[in-house]
Image (cartoon, coloured by chain):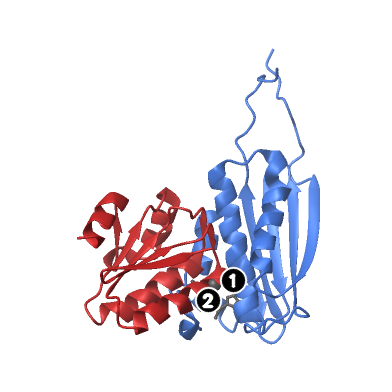
Chain colours: A red, B blue
Amino acid sequence: MEDFKVINNYLMIRLPDEIDHHKSVDISSKADRYIMSGRVENVVFDFERTSFMDSSGIGIILGRYKKVSCFGGKVYAVNADSRIRRILLMSGLENMVEIMDAKKAYGEVEK
Amino acid sequence: MIEVAEKREIGTITNEVRVEFGAVSENESFARMAVAAFITPLNPTLEELADVKTAVSEAVTNAIIHGYENRGDRNDKILMDCVLRGDVLEIEISDRGVGIEDVSAAMQPLYTSKPELERSGMGFAFMEAFTDNLEVRSEPGCGTNVRMCKKIGMSPWIGSEE
Ligand SMILES: Nc1ncnc2c1ncn2[C@@H]1O[C@H](COP(=O)(O)OP(=O)(O)OP(=O)(O)O)[C@@H](O)[C@H]1O
Ligand SMILES: [Mg+2]
């Protein structure tokens, strides 16, 4: 299962082992509840536990990016392995999502 | 003397499975696992396994979301045929859904007919990138057939048998 946590104005989403269409609908709608609550400005996707992602994952990230970026928010990806990075880059997400070292990202969030 | 450990006639089918399943999203992971299990005897690398799982996931998801318009009705069927010819895997995924009007337009990266469902238009691009060959045949009103081929595993070392 994925889990959600708000630290300062960052929504941290720990993604599940496999991200596909079946899982994505739920993740997006839960994330949007936090975003709509107005408590979060930025979103951090944590891929630590993720071993599989298809284009549905791109949809989750792009969809959240569209929602937070119009209020100046940012989207980060942490703990993405080489395959997930490749999928993000192939989809042209490098200008929307900052791929970050987990330590650096969590340091930033907890400031 | 050097001997080739295994010699197979190219094109001979060495194994095959056919699975039919309902077009519901739960079956996306089932389809990935079924194909992964099918190719396990070929000793695929982790990368090859991930490539095949991604390609299958994309084709099956498309059949569910686009072919059968996300109805989630298990009476809508998806057919998955897997064939091995030596170390070459062929996968065919077919639906009897709405079909595609213009296949080459649909295959363009970033093209999607369902942006409201947060689709990104990368499915065909991933199928193409992660397999050796991709063929899409479709007839509006009849359905869609996606055929992919991929060579699995490294060729065996000559004379490396214990
Ligand atoms: N089995 C199918 N039946 C009907 N239409 C299809 C089928 N597969 C693909 N299409 C059409 O081709 C388009 C492109 O497919 P593709 O998988 O590349 O992108 P997508 O599914 O829209 O987005 P993504 O795969 O990134 O979530 C789809 O938007 C749809 O219009
Ligand atoms: Mg798709």
Residue A73 lies, in percent from the top left, at 25, 74
Q: Please identify the quadrant where the C terminus of chain A is shown.
A: bottom left
What amino acid type should be assigned to the residue bearing mark 1?
Answer: His
Taking depth in this image into account, of B44 and B138 the one nearest to the observer is B44
Q: Are marks 1 and 2 on the same chain?
A: yes
Residue depicted at x 71% and y 20%: B3
Residue depicted at x 56% and y 59%: B54
Q: Is the residue under label 2 in contact with that under label 1 (CB below 8 Å)?
A: yes
Residue B101 lies, in percent from the top left, at 59, 84
Residue depicted at x 50% and y 62%: B126
Instruction: State the SS at label 2.
Output: helix
Number of numbered discs visible in the structure rendering: 2
What amino acid type should be assigned to the residue bearing mark 2?
Answer: Val
In this view, B74 is above or below A82 = below
Residue B109 lies, in percent from the top left, at 44, 70
Left or right side of B143 for B52? left
Left or right side of B63 for B103? left
- Specify whether residue A56 is in view: yes
- Specify whether residue B109 is in view: no
Q: Give the distance between the C-alpha atoms of the residues marked 1 and 2, in whole angstroms.
A: 7 Å
User: What chain does badge 1 belong to?
Assistant: A
Ligand 2, image quadrant it occupies: bottom right
- Label number found at residue A32: none
In this view, A55 is above or below A103 = below
Taking depth in this image into account, of A27 and B158 the one nearest to the observer is A27
Instruction: State the SS at label 1.
Output: helix
Taking depth in this image into account, of A84 and B130 the one nearest to the observer is A84
The residue identified by callout 2 is: A25
Residue depicted at x 27% and y 75%: A41
The residue identified by callout 1 is: A22
Residue B138 lies, in percent from the top left, at 65, 77
